[in-house]
Image (cartoon, rainbow, N blue to C red):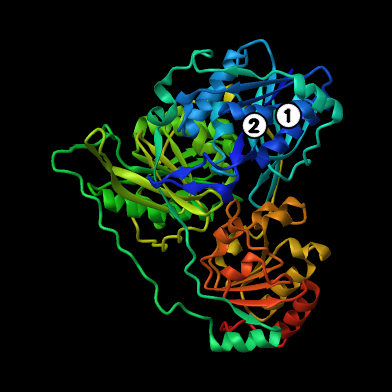
Amino acid sequence: MTIISLMKQVPVPSQMRMGDDGLMDRTKAKSMINIDCSFALEAGLQLKSMMSDAKLIVCSMGPPSFEMSLKTAISMGYDEAYLLSDRKLGGSDTYATGLAISTMLKHLGFGKGLDEDFIIVAGRQTSDGDTAHVPSQVAENLNIPQATFIEDVQFEKGKIVAKRIIEGGFQTLSLSTPCALSLTPTGISPRRPTLAGAVKARSAEVTVFSIDDINLSDEKIGLTGSPTIVAKVTNIKSDRAPVIMCADVEALKESIKLGKNSLESVEKKVKKKKEAPEDFEKVDFRDGASGILTWAEVVNGKISRPSLELLTPAKRLASALQNNTKVRTLLIGSGVEDLAKELIYHGSDEVIVVDDVRLEEYMILPFSSIFAQVIKEYRPEIALFAATTAGRELAPRIGVKTQSGVTADCTALEIGEHIDRKKKVVYSPILESRRPTYGESKLATILGFVCPQISTARAGTFEVPTRDEKAKGEIKVYEPSLSEDDFLTKIVETIRGEGGLSNLFEADVIVAGGRGTLGDDMKLIKELSSALNEQGINAEWASSRPVVDSGICEYARQIGQTGKTVRPKVYIAVGVSGAIQHIAGMKESESIIAINKNQKEAIFSNADFGIVGEYSEVLPELIKQVKAGFVFGLKV
């Protein structure tokens, strides 16, 4: 058995600068091992302890400077290190990266059908891109099973048993080897290198490959070979007015009565649309592809809210494309045909139903196979997925099957055009997918040039379309071809409750606890939420990522870049530092109240009202006032 850890170095986000071309320049930024990858390194070492004869290797793709990080892995206990480094790889998107890494692994002798058994461990995502694509793409290129968002992994009786985070709970999966796993930072913290390991690493050699060494063509790698490009990057700036600081809860009550600060004037610069010269050729790269395909994820016997949200941008995109562009939705499950009507009531023109008792719960292999077959038959120009745990692993795997690029966690989707002045052509129409990146400090516009153009949309970003029972649509039953290999992974157990998932999108007030609320396991946070409910206010409690990583709160309640995006009337951030990743998930709230003992925390720069004080002192008084009738100015 060989355990292969995929590792990436990432630039320190605060040291990134925007270049003259409007794209990000990382040349002067220091690098570090991606945080999620460090947990994957530890998972590999843990697996090694369960199978003493296993060999540990670490692989990476990047410039020669990555060798130092690879030697760090050796100092932790890894046996061999390999680096794929070639200037022709520069500018590769995730599709090209997944192809390159999997080609290197095949060169090393790993791939389905070969004699040697192996397990790939990788980080859930990287901090610079946050796409979570590459583990899925490597798995698809190697044609092996995968499991993502893993926080615990064991090797039992020749099988991998993995605990996977899902919305509202967790799932236990049993996987045959070879397989690929991506680890979350909720796993076992990475160990420090040993002295003996450091000595070993000093003299260890990292094997460096070029693309010629592994017989990789430059046709589908690098900037020119990637199916997607970053067309533009802009800074994300807050337009929230300065915070009103309050001495105590009484002062907060009075301030809320008077109202929050407002910006006296917001300068809006309307940039003139760039016009292409008249002699530029207009190119329609769709090659006959037409229509928009969405996925309806079924959770607890219902269509998930994020899946319904997708129909809002889908209908808008269809309208912009004109020519009676259809919105189709693929519905997969067992006994789900009745749910098809709900999709039509919410805006889908056509629902493709795959009803199979074996597909009662989502599984990556059969679902991705079904999607590939449907895409081949219907040839949509755009495919949209919700950026749930399932959607974030399904979309990139389908992207490899269709050789399409994938854009992750989008907050805006529009139809536009791309002017290529070098080739003197205009690509139109094209999907412009916009997503926050580099720790939510930048907004990138991504373009894809292979159909279907695939994007995942951040949950909570779009409104659910108004339900209309008079809406007409067509329901079609589809029978895919599935093999035994599509069911290699077994679901051992699924534990899923509501977990605050649906109500977080609908709550009028959300009380979120951060690192500062860990002292009492968020007891006062929950009490404040309950007190508001007793007053007739639709309230829910949530958390920042550090609370989830500590194991106190389930992932379904996490707000932020890698969690949920919410828009309540009132958002109460307690003990939250205000990291930009968290701000990304709550900045659209109507009013934000920050409570923190440190007045220098960034959360106050993103709030309307603030109280500097100890959690254990401010919350009891706030709960008391709520029980006496104070509901933050909302009408009961």
Position of 225 with respect to 635 (left or right) is: left
Q: Is residue 261 above or below residue 571?
A: below
Of 242 and 358, the residue lying toward us: 242
Residue 600, image x, y percentages? 67, 68
Residue 151, image x, y percentages? 73, 41
Instruction: Residue 514: name its quadrant.
Output: bottom right
Of 452 and 106, the residue lying toward us: 106
Residue 419, image x, y percentages? 26, 42
Position of 323 with respect to 299 (left or right) is: left
Q: Residue at x 69, y 88 (%)?
A: 250
The amino acid sitting under disc 2 is: Met
Disc number for residue 7: 2
Residue 453, image x, y percentages? 38, 39
Q: Is residue 131 above or below residue 48?
A: below
Instruction: Residue 427: name its quadrant.
Output: top left
Residue under label 1 = 73
Kindly state the secondary structure of the residue where label 2 is placed.
loop
Q: Residue furthest top?
A: 115
Kindly state the secondary structure of the residue where label 1 is placed.
helix
